[in-house]
Image (spheres, rainbow, N blue to C red):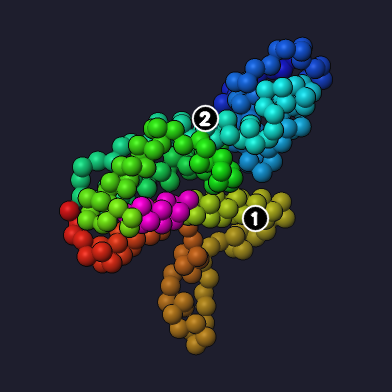
Amino acid sequence: MAVVRESAEGTQPTVGRRRRARGSLSSGEILAAARDLVAQDGLARLSMPALARRLGCGVMSVYRYFDTKDDLLAALADQAMSDLHRQLPPAGDGPWRDELITYFTAYRDLMESFSVYREVVLYAPTFVIRAALTPAQLRRLDTGIGLLLRAGLPLADAAEVYNVCFNYTRSFVAFEHAARATATGAAATAAAARAPAAAQTPGRQLPADEYPQLSRLADIDGVLGVDERGFRLGLELLATGIAGRYHVADR
Protein backbone atom coordinates (compact mmCIF):
# COMPACT_ATOMS: atom_id res chain seq x y z
CA MET A 1 0.00 0.00 0.00
CA ALA A 2 1.44 3.38 -1.00
CA VAL A 3 1.87 6.18 1.49
CA VAL A 4 1.68 9.63 -0.11
CA ARG A 5 3.55 12.69 1.12
CA GLU A 6 3.33 16.20 -0.29
CA SER A 7 6.29 17.90 -1.94
CA ALA A 8 6.89 21.21 -3.70
CA GLU A 9 6.39 19.55 -7.07
CA GLY A 10 3.48 17.24 -6.36
CA THR A 11 2.88 13.98 -4.56
CA GLN A 12 5.63 11.48 -3.99
CA PRO A 13 4.42 7.96 -3.26
CA THR A 14 6.63 5.93 -1.00
CA VAL A 15 6.02 2.38 -2.13
CA GLY A 16 5.83 -0.44 0.39
CA ARG A 17 6.33 -4.13 -0.27
CA ARG A 18 2.76 -5.05 -1.11
CA ARG A 19 1.53 -4.74 -4.66
CA ARG A 20 -1.53 -2.62 -5.18
CA ALA A 21 -4.83 -4.20 -6.23
CA ARG A 22 -5.49 -4.80 -9.91
CA GLY A 23 -7.55 -2.03 -11.46
CA SER A 24 -6.70 0.51 -8.76
CA LEU A 25 -4.56 2.66 -11.08
CA SER A 26 -5.64 5.60 -13.23
CA SER A 27 -3.94 7.52 -16.03
CA GLY A 28 -3.97 10.63 -13.83
CA GLU A 29 -2.14 8.85 -11.02
CA ILE A 30 0.43 7.49 -13.44
CA LEU A 31 1.04 10.95 -14.86
CA ALA A 32 1.38 12.44 -11.38
CA ALA A 33 3.97 9.80 -10.48
CA ALA A 34 5.81 10.42 -13.76
CA ARG A 35 5.94 14.15 -13.01
CA ASP A 36 7.41 13.44 -9.59
CA LEU A 37 10.04 11.11 -11.01
CA VAL A 38 11.04 13.67 -13.63
CA ALA A 39 11.17 16.45 -11.02
CA GLN A 40 13.31 14.30 -8.75
CA ASP A 41 15.62 12.45 -11.15
CA GLY A 42 15.28 14.16 -14.54
CA LEU A 43 13.60 13.05 -17.74
CA ALA A 44 16.48 10.79 -18.74
CA ARG A 45 15.82 8.57 -15.70
CA LEU A 46 12.13 8.13 -16.42
CA SER A 47 11.31 4.56 -17.40
CA MET A 48 8.29 2.30 -17.24
CA PRO A 49 9.93 -0.05 -14.67
CA ALA A 50 10.92 2.90 -12.44
CA LEU A 51 7.40 4.27 -12.70
CA ALA A 52 5.91 0.90 -11.81
CA ARG A 53 8.15 0.62 -8.75
CA ARG A 54 7.05 4.04 -7.60
CA LEU A 55 3.40 3.15 -8.03
CA GLY A 56 3.77 -0.27 -6.41
CA CYS A 57 2.43 -2.14 -9.42
CA GLY A 58 3.63 -4.34 -12.26
CA VAL A 59 5.03 -2.76 -15.42
CA MET A 60 2.20 -4.21 -17.48
CA SER A 61 -0.26 -2.27 -15.36
CA VAL A 62 1.32 0.95 -16.60
CA TYR A 63 1.23 -0.31 -20.19
CA ARG A 64 -2.52 -0.81 -19.92
CA TYR A 65 -2.84 2.98 -19.87
CA PHE A 66 0.12 3.98 -22.06
CA ASP A 67 1.09 1.65 -24.89
CA THR A 68 4.65 3.01 -25.14
CA LYS A 69 6.97 5.34 -23.29
CA ASP A 70 6.49 7.83 -26.12
CA ASP A 71 2.75 7.85 -25.36
CA LEU A 72 3.53 8.56 -21.73
CA LEU A 73 5.95 11.34 -22.70
CA ALA A 74 3.35 12.86 -25.01
CA ALA A 75 0.76 13.00 -22.21
CA LEU A 76 3.34 14.36 -19.75
CA ALA A 77 4.49 17.01 -22.23
CA ASP A 78 0.92 18.04 -22.96
CA GLN A 79 0.20 18.49 -19.26
CA ALA A 80 3.47 20.25 -18.43
CA MET A 81 3.38 22.57 -21.43
CA SER A 82 -0.22 23.51 -20.74
CA ASP A 83 0.62 24.34 -17.13
CA LEU A 84 3.71 26.28 -18.21
CA HIS A 85 1.91 28.49 -20.69
CA ARG A 86 -1.02 29.14 -18.37
CA GLN A 87 1.40 30.75 -15.92
CA LEU A 88 3.28 32.87 -18.43
CA PRO A 89 2.12 36.51 -18.61
CA PRO A 90 0.91 37.73 -22.01
CA ALA A 91 3.03 40.10 -24.06
CA GLY A 92 2.31 43.73 -23.22
CA ASP A 93 1.85 46.84 -25.33
CA GLY A 94 5.15 48.56 -24.44
CA PRO A 95 8.13 49.09 -26.73
CA TRP A 96 8.93 45.87 -28.58
CA ARG A 97 12.47 45.72 -27.20
CA ASP A 98 11.33 45.92 -23.56
CA GLU A 99 8.49 43.48 -24.16
CA LEU A 100 10.78 40.97 -25.88
CA ILE A 101 13.17 40.96 -22.92
CA THR A 102 10.29 40.65 -20.45
CA TYR A 103 8.71 37.87 -22.55
CA PHE A 104 11.76 35.60 -22.55
CA THR A 105 12.81 36.49 -19.00
CA ALA A 106 9.43 35.25 -17.76
CA TYR A 107 9.91 32.05 -19.77
CA ARG A 108 13.33 31.44 -18.23
CA ASP A 109 12.11 32.19 -14.71
CA LEU A 110 9.29 29.68 -14.96
CA MET A 111 11.53 26.95 -16.33
CA GLU A 112 13.92 27.63 -13.46
CA SER A 113 11.12 27.42 -10.90
CA PHE A 114 9.56 24.12 -12.02
CA SER A 115 11.97 21.35 -12.85
CA VAL A 116 9.43 19.13 -14.58
CA TYR A 117 8.66 21.91 -17.08
CA ARG A 118 12.37 22.48 -17.65
CA GLU A 119 13.04 18.79 -18.21
CA VAL A 120 10.21 18.43 -20.71
CA VAL A 121 10.99 21.62 -22.62
CA LEU A 122 14.72 20.92 -22.77
CA TYR A 123 14.96 17.17 -23.15
CA ALA A 124 11.75 15.70 -24.55
CA PRO A 125 12.01 14.64 -28.21
CA THR A 126 11.09 17.39 -30.67
CA PHE A 127 8.16 15.43 -32.07
CA VAL A 128 6.71 15.16 -28.56
CA ILE A 129 6.98 18.92 -27.98
CA ARG A 130 5.36 19.70 -31.33
CA ALA A 131 2.52 17.30 -30.68
CA ALA A 132 1.92 18.93 -27.29
CA LEU A 133 1.27 22.40 -28.73
CA THR A 134 -2.14 23.56 -27.55
CA PRO A 135 -4.16 26.60 -28.69
CA ALA A 136 -2.92 28.51 -25.61
CA GLN A 137 0.69 27.80 -26.52
CA LEU A 138 0.12 28.70 -30.15
CA ARG A 139 -1.46 32.00 -29.08
CA ARG A 140 1.60 32.83 -27.00
CA LEU A 141 3.88 31.95 -29.89
CA ASP A 142 1.72 34.18 -32.08
CA THR A 143 2.07 37.13 -29.69
CA GLY A 144 5.84 36.62 -29.47
CA ILE A 145 6.17 36.81 -33.24
CA GLY A 146 3.80 39.78 -33.10
CA LEU A 147 6.33 41.69 -30.98
CA LEU A 148 8.84 41.39 -33.80
CA LEU A 149 6.26 42.33 -36.42
CA ARG A 150 5.57 45.43 -34.35
CA ALA A 151 9.27 46.25 -34.60
CA GLY A 152 8.93 46.21 -38.38
CA LEU A 153 10.34 42.80 -39.34
CA PRO A 154 8.78 40.88 -42.22
CA LEU A 155 6.80 37.82 -41.09
CA ALA A 156 9.38 35.23 -42.22
CA ASP A 157 12.20 37.12 -40.48
CA ALA A 158 10.09 37.63 -37.35
CA ALA A 159 9.49 33.87 -37.10
CA GLU A 160 13.19 33.12 -37.60
CA VAL A 161 14.33 35.72 -35.05
CA TYR A 162 11.78 34.48 -32.53
CA ASN A 163 13.23 30.99 -32.90
CA VAL A 164 16.74 32.35 -32.23
CA CYS A 165 15.56 34.08 -29.03
CA PHE A 166 13.67 30.97 -27.95
CA ASN A 167 16.67 28.72 -28.51
CA TYR A 168 18.93 31.18 -26.69
CA THR A 169 16.61 31.03 -23.68
CA ARG A 170 16.40 27.24 -23.66
CA SER A 171 20.16 26.86 -24.12
CA PHE A 172 20.93 29.30 -21.32
CA VAL A 173 18.60 27.48 -18.93
CA ALA A 174 20.14 24.11 -19.86
CA PHE A 175 23.67 25.41 -19.31
CA GLU A 176 22.65 27.20 -16.11
CA HIS A 177 21.06 24.04 -14.73
CA ALA A 178 24.08 21.91 -15.66
CA ALA A 179 26.48 24.44 -14.08
CA ARG A 180 24.43 24.52 -10.89
CA ALA A 181 24.36 20.72 -10.68
CA THR A 182 28.12 20.57 -11.24
CA ALA A 183 28.75 23.21 -8.57
CA THR A 184 26.53 21.37 -6.10
CA GLY A 185 28.36 18.13 -6.76
CA ALA A 186 31.76 19.80 -6.40
CA ALA A 187 30.73 21.45 -3.14
CA ALA A 188 29.53 18.13 -1.76
CA THR A 189 32.79 16.45 -2.78
CA ALA A 190 34.84 19.21 -1.19
CA ALA A 191 32.81 19.04 1.99
CA ALA A 192 33.20 15.27 2.14
CA ALA A 193 36.95 15.65 1.73
CA ARG A 194 36.97 18.48 4.28
CA ALA A 195 38.75 20.80 1.86
CA PRO A 196 40.22 23.97 3.38
CA ALA A 197 37.95 27.00 3.15
CA ALA A 198 40.55 28.87 1.11
CA ALA A 199 40.40 26.25 -1.60
CA GLN A 200 36.66 26.77 -1.92
CA THR A 201 36.85 30.57 -2.17
CA PRO A 202 36.07 31.87 -5.69
CA GLY A 203 38.46 34.24 -7.41
CA ARG A 204 42.13 33.83 -8.24
CA GLN A 205 45.16 36.09 -8.47
CA LEU A 206 46.93 35.69 -11.80
CA PRO A 207 50.37 37.05 -12.70
CA ALA A 208 50.08 40.22 -14.80
CA ASP A 209 53.02 39.36 -17.03
CA GLU A 210 51.28 36.20 -18.24
CA TYR A 211 47.68 37.37 -18.17
CA PRO A 212 47.62 41.16 -18.60
CA GLN A 213 43.81 41.38 -18.94
CA LEU A 214 42.62 38.62 -16.61
CA SER A 215 44.94 39.77 -13.83
CA ARG A 216 42.99 43.04 -13.63
CA LEU A 217 39.69 41.31 -12.94
CA ALA A 218 38.54 40.89 -9.36
CA ASP A 219 37.14 37.44 -10.15
CA ILE A 220 37.91 35.64 -13.39
CA ASP A 221 35.24 33.05 -12.63
CA GLY A 222 32.72 35.74 -13.61
CA VAL A 223 33.93 35.43 -17.20
CA LEU A 224 32.62 31.86 -17.32
CA GLY A 225 29.65 32.19 -14.97
CA VAL A 226 25.95 31.93 -15.78
CA ASP A 227 23.45 34.04 -13.88
CA GLU A 228 20.42 36.27 -14.27
CA ARG A 229 22.50 39.31 -15.11
CA GLY A 230 24.27 37.47 -17.91
CA PHE A 231 20.98 36.16 -19.27
CA ARG A 232 19.46 39.63 -19.42
CA LEU A 233 22.60 41.04 -21.03
CA GLY A 234 22.32 38.36 -23.70
CA LEU A 235 18.72 39.34 -24.42
CA GLU A 236 19.69 43.00 -24.61
CA LEU A 237 22.46 42.18 -27.06
CA LEU A 238 20.02 40.14 -29.15
CA ALA A 239 17.55 43.04 -29.16
CA THR A 240 20.32 45.46 -30.17
CA GLY A 241 21.37 43.11 -32.95
CA ILE A 242 17.77 42.82 -34.17
CA ALA A 243 17.38 46.60 -34.21
CA GLY A 244 20.65 47.05 -36.11
CA ARG A 245 20.15 44.27 -38.64
CA TYR A 246 16.60 45.23 -39.53
CA HIS A 247 16.99 49.00 -39.00
CA VAL A 248 14.11 49.29 -36.53
CA ALA A 249 13.53 51.75 -33.72
CA ASP A 250 12.84 50.92 -30.06
CA ARG A 251 9.16 51.71 -30.30
Residue 153's disc is none
In the figure, residue 152 lies in which quadrant?
bottom left
- Residue 44 at x, y = what percent? 66, 44
Element carrying mark 1: helix
Q: Is residue 18 above or below residue 138?
A: above
Q: Is residue 8 magenta?
A: no
Q: Residue at x 24, y 41 (%)?
A: 92
Residue type, numbered disc 1 = Ala
Q: Main secondary structure of the magenta part?
A: helix
223 is higher (above) or lower (below) than 85 = below
Residues at marks 1 and 2, CA–CA distance in whole angstroms: 34 Å
In this picture, which residue range is highlighted in magenta?
Answer: 158-170
Residue 232 visible in the snapshot: no
Report which residue position mark 1 lands on: 186
Give the SS element for disc 2: helix
**Residue 144: x %, y % from top left:** 32, 45
**Residue shown at the point (80%, 17%) measured from the top left:** 19
Of the pair 180 and 22, the residue shown nearer to us: 22
| Horizontal arrangement in the rendering, residue 145 relative to residue 45 (left or right) | left
Pair 1/2: label in front = 2
What number is the disc on residue 79? 2
N-terminal-most mark, 1 or 2: 2
